[in-house]
Image: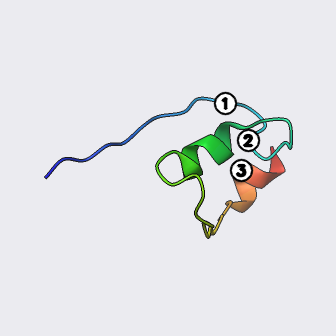
Amino acid sequence: MSYEYPVYFTSNVFSPENGCLIAAITRKELARRHRLLVVVEEVVAAE
């Protein structure tokens, strides 16, 4: 069994102009509708 853990470095990950998050989520199944839950800690959100 093999595993892949790609790493992405980016800023403003939720910006519409930044395609990095979409690329990370859809990298194996581009045509599939993906569900995503995002949790951000209060301290991180304040920055």
* Picture residue at 61% right of the left edge, 41% below the top: 23
The residue furthest right is 16
x and y percentages locating residue 24 in the rendered image? 56, 44
Amino acid at circle 1: Thr
* Picture residue at 18% right of the left edge, 47% below the top: 2
34 sits left or right of 44 in the view: left
* N-terminal-most mark, 3 or 1: 1
In the rendered image of this protein, does residue 30 appear above or below residue 13?
Answer: below
CB atoms of marks 2 and 1 within 8 Å:
yes
Q: Residues within 10 Å of mark 1 (few under 14, many from 20)?
A: few
Q: Residues within 10 Å of mark 3 (few under 14, many from 20)?
A: few
Quadrant (top left/top right/bottom left/bottom right) for the C terminus: top right
**Which residue corresponds to mark 1?**
10
* N-terminal-most mark, 2 or 3: 2
37 sits left or right of 1 in the view: right
Amino acid at circle 3: Val
**Which residue corresponds to mark 2?**
13
x and y percentages locating residue 14 in the rendered image? 79, 47
Given this view, does label 3 or label 1 mark the residue nearer the observer?
1
| Secondary structure type for disc 3 | helix
**Which residue corresponds to mark 3?**
44
